[in-house]
Image: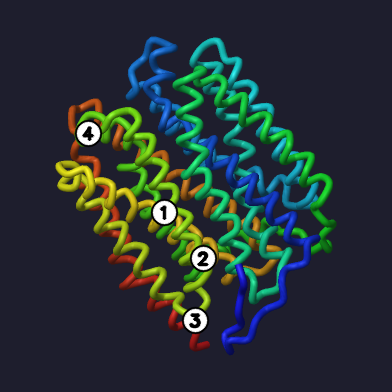
Amino acid sequence: MQLYRKDGSMLPPIPWKYALPLFGLATSAFMFNTSEFMPIGLLSDIAASFEMTPAQTGIMITVYAWMVGLLSLPLMLAACRMDLRHLLLLTLGLFMAGQLGSAFAVNFPMLMAARIAVACAHSVFWSIAGPLATRLVTQVRQPFALSVIATGSSIAMIFGLPLGRVVGLALGWRMTFFSLAVIALLALLFLWRVFPPLSKQAPFSLHELPALFKTPLTAGIFILSLLFATAYFTTYSFIEPFLATVAGFSASSITWTLMVLGLCGFFGSMLFSRLYGTHRFLVLRAGVIGLFAGLLLFLPAAAFAPAMLACCMLLGTISTLSNVAMQAELIRSCSRTDAPVAMSIFSGIFNVGIGGGTFLSGHLTSAGALSDIGFFGAAIAGLAVVYTLCAYLPAAREAGRR
């Protein structure tokens, strides 16, 4: 993608020695997002192999998310003195080991243990991915660098999650995990070869931690991330059974719908790259309002297949657009030293929201209220709208005037 300065002049292309590491980070983002959400598309298959119900196996999504929420900050604090390049490679190695453990799990507790190992890798990766990407480029290119990472995540939703479902249905869900382990090995070798050494920076001090929660903009993003993730995943975590039983979609239609949803996530990353630098507040407003509208219409849209598809497309676009915008806001308000730790808190809180949303929708499903997951998500999204418009954006404008 060709980039331009605010005055309209063209920016020179990114040198290959930095473009290749960005590609490697995007590939890693693809793997981590595919791994995190892959069980959503394979819940029924995994449940059948262990003689459980989808609602029971859905706990693996909740536990994964909550482990990331609990471990992100402690693991990043423990590793903050480590060279970020070495930490990235170590994280990919742990991810690969966890995928192999998942592929060869002989019972559900063993699968859960392997998923917890992957959650540890996830905790560290999403703490350092954004800061690493922005350190590879100049400040004017930072939104583009973040959008590249988001593109990797979106491709996971376009191809990774649906293809994982296809492989799982055709060859068994274990082969899906094994395939991810192979991709992880290739990504590790690639990044070991191309990722440049980075300049050293002052280590983060534990005494600086309280300031991250006291700063209005960083604390505001933490609150917004919790509301956004809880709202979205109250609906998204059980989208497969919803589409099958409420909307009446066939198995192949569900796969294609998930693929289109992911494709719209790619569109959301493109919108972010083009709009955030010049229309920052518009992007933040559109994200929360779009989420509220999409979730509110989720059940009414189920009566008409094209409307259901359009609703999923809106949610796919908004989820990526808002997620990357929140990361950009956080990096914008932090120093280079603080950014990885702040991102670890963001990742942890976001995953607490994922776990909370999945937990809520799991209980709704068990109680026979699967059809209402959109309304419950919309209620939480309404809080995100109010908070963004009445608290966060005024604080951001005030900070900009200083």
Q: Earlier in the sequence, mark 2 or mark 3?
A: 2
Q: Which mark is residue 264?
A: 1
Mark 1 Cα shell of 10 Å, populated few (<14), some (14-19), many (≥20): many
Question: Separation of disc 1 and disc 2 at Cα?
Answer: 28 Å
Q: Earlier in the sequence, mark 4 or mark 1?
A: 1
**Disc 4 versus disc 2: nearer the observer:** 4
Q: Is residue 10 above or below residue 112?
A: below
Which corner quadrant holds the N terminus? bottom right
Question: Separation of disc 4 and disc 1 at Cα?
Answer: 24 Å
Residue at x 75% of width, y 40% of height: 188
Disc 4, disc 2: CB below 8 Å? no
Label 4: which residue? 370
SS under mark 4:
helix
Label 3: which residue? 399
Mark 3 Cα shell of 10 Å, populated few (<14), some (14-19), many (≥20): few
Residue 156 left/right relative to 42: right
The x and y percentages for residue 262 are 44, 47
Disc 1, disc 2: CB below 8 Å? no
Label 2: which residue? 218
